[in-house]
Amino acid sequence: MIDTRVTLDNCVGPYDCKGTGWSYRFNLDATRQVSAGTLEMADSYGFSCMETIHVIDGREGGPDTVHVFDSGETYEVNEDGDRAARAVAVRVRWRGKTPTATPITVTPQVRRAARETKNRTASRGAARAVVICVRWQWVGDEGSGALDVIEPLDDGYYPIGGGEWPWCEVTWDCACGYTPDWHETDCLCGLTRDSEPKTLLDIATVKAGQTLRTLAPEATSALVDLTSLGHICAVYAGDTEIDTADDTGPYDTETLGAADEILRKALDEAAPADLAASDWEHLPDESSAHVYRITFPDAR
């Protein structure tokens, strides 16, 4: 299993989890977030087409509690058109090391017991939690057949959903333009998820480096003169300057011009303070006081 992030149908999330493919599991904090997300989607699209997650909190050794979950919707119960509330209920037994939850029929007495549970003072035992999944589309007369208890695995994580849930793995946008999956922390361009450039100028450095490396893969840095429009005045492989002459070196005018344009666009859009906040190293020389070294990420 890998550590990654997912969204639910790209509508709610992202949530930290473990898993691959369509099988994901979540710690209790993330499970609470998933619960809130499923309820948000149910409110938006209707409970009858959703499954929702619910976390019930209690205390070890405390008295049994009763909980009713209402959708706010009704369903037809017979051919005469009579309707009933789309709701489910569960009774939780907190005595013992592991709490147990049992689906029960929603009745007036059960609703009364659920109200009493809400008004009850919490006991002093160790905190415990029960996680349930309600499949609202299957709520029938009894209501209990649509309720599943999700037991934590040995690592304490809860397996939620499955192949039928539209989990979508989160990606991250690398400055080079590639979008690796969240668990792929290293991009092929040499950047990592945690070392992503934040300023427009540093992002432009990555893209200009990509352009220059198409003809000289060994390129590691360049000098940029910001005088007038700004342009690349030298390219280096380590400490060795690469010949940038159009007729003798690896570069042509078009490639150098494309890299120049990337940097000029970033300079035009950047705020005045961005230059100082970037990783551009000021290296004034005899010919210009506005020369900066830009260093490209190590290629993999």
Image: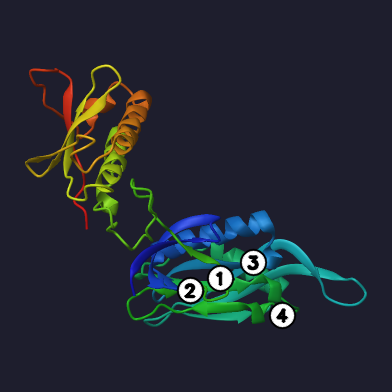
Mark 1 → mark 3, Cα distance in angstroms: 10 Å
Quick one: label 3, few (<14), some, or many (20+) residues within 10 Å? some
- Judged by depth in the image, the label closer to the viewer, 4 or 1, is 1
- Judged by depth in the image, the label closer to the viewer, 1 or 3, is 1
Q: Residue placed at 39% from the left, 55% from the top?
A: 179
Q: Position of residue 39 (x, y in %)?
A: 58, 59
Q: Which residue is mark 1?
A: 165
Q: Which residue is mark 2?
A: 22
- Sequence-first tag of 1 and 2: 2
> Which quadrant of the view contains residue 72?
bottom right
Query: Dot 1 lies on which element?
Result: loop
Q: Which residue is mark 4?
A: 142
How is colour applied across the structure in the image? rainbow
Task: Give, as a three-letter code, the residue at label 3.
Answer: Met
The reply to whether the C-beta atoms of the residues labelled 1 and 2 are less than 8 Å apart is yes
Query: Dot 3 lies on which element?
Result: loop
- Sequence-first tag of 1 and 3: 3
> Is 288 in front, or is 45?
288
Q: Which residue is mark 3?
A: 50
In the image, is residue 232 above or below residue 213? above
Task: Give, as a three-letter code, the residue at label 2.
Answer: Trp
Q: Position of residue 264 (x, y in %)?
A: 33, 27
